[in-house]
Image (cartoon, grey):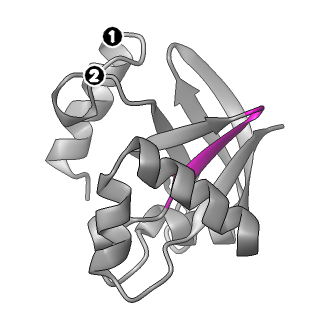
């Protein structure tokens, strides 16, 4: 079931070459299209990301919810996905980042966007960090 809020952001993103207003205005935003772990259906989710060299780093924060977002489970089951950045669409492979690298990337994201520090404080789970690399 599509989330109306996400659908609005996706439509605005696609209509404006990757630019959106509201709470995501000015933030680096991408559209991740992953394959459903159970359904096999394509699912598109707007996500704030951290550009790092050739990689795009995303965070399975789900606003600090106690469970990981669906897209995280989708990428674990099917690591090849598609990302829309600006007006470009690229194929990517997702890899979970762990340990010190995970902590460094999460800390960097939280310093740029303090909401991410709040998300980690809200939940007892360690929020997964995923690196997306072009294939």
71 and 20: which is toward the camera: 20
Q: Residue at x 84, y 37 (%)?
A: 135
Residue 83 seen in the figure: yes
- Horizontal placement of 130 versus 28: left or right? right
| Percent position of residue 127, x then y | 49, 73
Instruction: Give the residue number, with chain letter if any, for mark 2.
Output: 20
**Residue 55, magenta (yes or no):** yes
Q: Residue at x 77, y 32 (%)?
A: 54
Looking at the rendering, the stretch of residues picked out in magenta corresponds to 53-59
Q: Quadrant of the N terminus?
A: bottom left
| Percent position of residue 67, x then y | 37, 82
- Above-or-below relation of 68 to 72: below
Residue 97 seen in the figure: no
Assign a secondary structure to mark 1: loop
Which SS type dominates the magenta stretch?
Answer: strand
How many C-alpha atoms fall within 10 Å of the one at disc 2: few (<14), some, or many (≥20)?
Answer: many
- Horizontal placement of 41 versus 22: left or right? right
- Horizontal placement of 96 versus 15: left or right? right
Instruction: Give the residue number, with chain letter if any, for mark 1.
Output: 16
Q: Residue most toward the front?
A: 111
| Percent position of residue 61, x then y | 40, 65
> Is the C-beta separation of discs 1 and 2 under 8 Å?
yes
Quarter of the figure with residue 40: bottom right
| Percent position of residue 12, x then y | 26, 21
């Amino acid at each position: 079931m599509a989330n109306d809020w996400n659908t609005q952001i996706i439509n605005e993103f696609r209509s404006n070459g990757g630019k959106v207003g509201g709470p995501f205005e000015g933030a680096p935003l991408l559209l991740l299209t992953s394959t459903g772990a159970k359904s096999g259906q394509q699912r598109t989710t707007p996500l704030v990301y951290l550009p790092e060299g050739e990689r795009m780093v995303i965070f399975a924060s789900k606003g600090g919810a106690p469970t990981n977002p669906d897209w995280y489970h989708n990428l674990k089951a099917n690591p090849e996905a598609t990302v829309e950045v600006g007006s470009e669409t690229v194929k990517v492979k997702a890899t979970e980042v762990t340990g010190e690298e995970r902590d460094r990337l999460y800390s960097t994201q939280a310093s740029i966007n303090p909401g991410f520090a709040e998300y980690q404080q809200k939940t007892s789970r360690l929020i997964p960090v995923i690196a997306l690399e072009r294939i």
